[in-house]
Image (cartoon, rainbow, N blue to C red):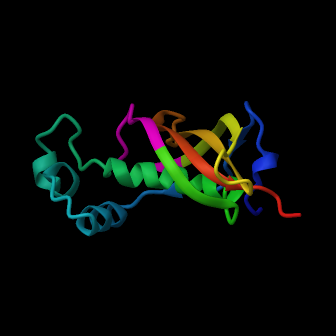
């Protein structure tokens, strides 16, 4: 399903996104290395044995990107101009290699753009949930969305 136009969003609308993704150790290592994050809590399994988690944590910025990415197909694919901002981001539970993440999106606000007549601003609440239904990521995101042509 392609993304939705600005006019197709309504406050309170909720999407339980169908695509899920299991996070791998390779995802975490690649992302931590690609973003130059050498924190032992992400890349050193031996170090992590001595932490309260006992294993490496998946990089939280990877988790955030995954949760938003899982929402794209059903919300913003081909219809977004740009992300305008992300606020109130939280990570209530850790993510580990082997966890399967799914995403839920709720439309919190819809308003016209004052500077772009061909677009409007949609505020999304994204929630990432693991295979046990535990919330692992929450983020409010504002996106500039195209209006339906014609």
Q: Position of residue 114 (x, y in %)?
A: 66, 45
- Report which quarter residue 62 is drawn in: bottom left
Q: Residue at x 11, y 53 (%)?
A: 46
- Rendered residue at 43%/57% (across/down): 23
> Where on the picture, by quarter, is residue 106?
top right
Q: Is residue 1 left or right of residue 107?
A: right
**Does residue 91 appear in the picture of this structure?**
yes
Given the current orientation, which residue lies at the most extreme right position?
A: 150
In front of the other: 85 or 16:
85
Q: Residue at x 46, y 43 (%)?
A: 86
Q: How many marks?
A: 0
Does 45 sit left or right of 138 as displayed? left
Q: Is residue 90 magenta?
A: yes
Picture quarter with the N terminus = bottom right
Q: Looking at the image, which residue sits at the far front?
A: 115
Name the quadrant containing residue 80.
bottom right
Q: With 128 as the anchor, is 144 left or right in this view?
A: right
| Position of residue 119 measured from the top left corner of the image (x, y, whole percent) | 71, 54
User: In which quadrant of the rendered image does the C terminus lie?
Assistant: bottom right
Q: Does residue 17 belong to the magenta stretch?
A: no
Decide which of 51, 17 is in the foreground and name it: 17
Decide: is 87 above or below 55.
Answer: above
Residue 20 visible in image? no
> For the magenta stretch, what is the residue range?
86-101
Q: Is residue 91 above or below residue 68?
A: above
Q: Position of residue 110 (x, y in %)?
A: 70, 38
Measured as percent of width and height from the top left, residue 95 is found at 37, 45
């Amino acid at each position: 399903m392609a993304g939705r136009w600005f006019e197709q969003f309504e406050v309170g609308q909720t999407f339980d996104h169908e695509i899920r993704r299991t996070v791998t150790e390779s995802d975490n290592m690649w992302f931590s290395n690609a973003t130059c994050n050498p924190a032992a809590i992400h890349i050193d399994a031996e170090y992590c044995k001595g932490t309260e988690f006992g294993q490496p944590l998946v990089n939280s910025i990877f988790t955030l990107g995954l949760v938003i990415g899982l929402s794209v197909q059903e919300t913003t694919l081909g219809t977004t101009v740009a992300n305008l901002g992300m606020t109130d981001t939280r990570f209530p539970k850790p993510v580990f290699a082997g966890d399967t993440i799914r995403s839920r999106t709720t439309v919190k606000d819809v308003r016209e753009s004052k500077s772009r007549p061909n677009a409007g601003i949609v505020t999304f609440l994204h929630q990432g949930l693991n295979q046990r239904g535990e919330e692992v990521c929450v983020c409010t995101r504002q996106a500039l969305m195209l209006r339906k042509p014609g």
